[in-house]
Image: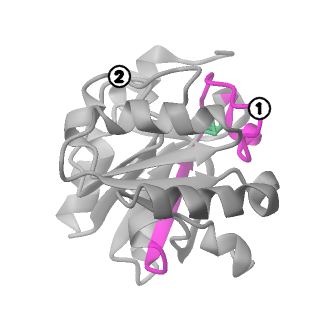
């Protein structure tokens, strides 16, 4: 990955901040709940349909101290922070989560599971990508599995990863956004046929919020 600074990533005291904002969660188990979002730069998984391509190169984003990030979150009424990316597992997130915990902020993460997770998390959403399978450690700790359906091959991938996660992990299928109209009928039928799955909608996109 271009200009990825391993030393900075390992310290976790500054993070390449793509954006931060207060909104509602739009996907998965916590849909509809308010949260402060922190999008960290850096990802080399290369999903062709990625809607966060601006996050791929971490050097394009300012390194921001976690003290500043936490104080910005505290200016809102948020009681939960969602750390997303990019691929946040590339960074040591222990310092960030410790600071959030001091302020009794719940810590949620959205990750493809590229590297073993650091930090103290209240909710782990694993969204694995088939071209870059997650670190095996995530299967035991994921609270939620969210598989993006782009084409039919993704159903096989969904079943493969679902067979590995812990028994309490909640299973979601979510259409890739640009294919929502064409994919959703098949996803609905799939969930009816295999009711261990749930549908996740990108509700924030329907609400026209970030
Ligand atoms: S893992 Fe996430 S950020 Fe990385 S390319 Fe795929 S969708 Fe984009």
- Judging by the rendered image, the residue that carries numbered circle 1 is 48
Q: Give the main secondary structure of the magenta stretch.
A: loop
**Image quarter of residue 9:** top left
**Image quarter of residue 1:** top right
Q: Is residue 114 above or below residue 14?
A: above
**Image quarter of residue 58:** top right
Q: Which residues are the magenta region?
A: 31-57
Residue at 63% across / 22% down in the picture? 44
Can residue 113 be seen in this snapshot? Answer: yes
Residue at 51% across / 45% down in the picture? 147
Residue at 59% across / 64% down in the picture? 188
Can residue 87 be seen in this snapshot? Answer: no
Q: Is residue 95 magenta?
A: no
Q: Which mark is residue 210?
A: none
Task: Categorize mark 1 by other alpha carbons within 10 Å: few (<14), some (14-19), many (20+).
Answer: few
Mark 2: which secondary structure?
Answer: loop
Q: Is residue 32 magenta?
A: yes
- Judging by the rendered image, the residue that carries numbered circle 2 is 135
Q: Quadrant of ligand 1?
A: top right
Q: Is residue 58 above or below residue 80?
A: above
């Amino acid at each position: 990955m271009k200009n990825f600074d391993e030393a900075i990533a390992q310290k976790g005291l500054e993070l390449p901040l793509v954006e931060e904002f207060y909104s509602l969660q739009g996907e998965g188990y916590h849909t509809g709940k308010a949260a402060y979002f922190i999008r960290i730069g850096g990802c080399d998984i290369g999903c062709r349909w990625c809607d966060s391509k601006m996050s791929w190169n971490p050097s394009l984003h300012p390194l921001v101290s976690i003290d500043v990030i936490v104080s910005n979150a505290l200016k809102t009424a948020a009681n939960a922070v969602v750390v997303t990316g990019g691929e946040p597992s590339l960074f040591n997130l222990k310092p960030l989560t410790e600071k959030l915990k001091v302020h009794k902020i719940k810590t949620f993460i959205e990750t493809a599971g590229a590297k073993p997770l650091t930090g103290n998390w209240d909710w782990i959403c694993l969204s694995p990508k088939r071209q870059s399978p997650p670190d095996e450690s995530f299967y035991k700790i994921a609270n939620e599995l969210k598989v993006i359906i782009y084409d039919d091959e993704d159903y096989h991938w969904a079943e493969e990863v679902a067979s590995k996660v812990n028994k309490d992990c909640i299973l979601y299928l979510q259409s890739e956004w640009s294919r929502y109209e064409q994919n959703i009928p098949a996803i609905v039928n799939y969930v009816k046929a295999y009711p261990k799955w749930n549908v996740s909608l990108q509700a924030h996109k329907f609400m026209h919020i970030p």
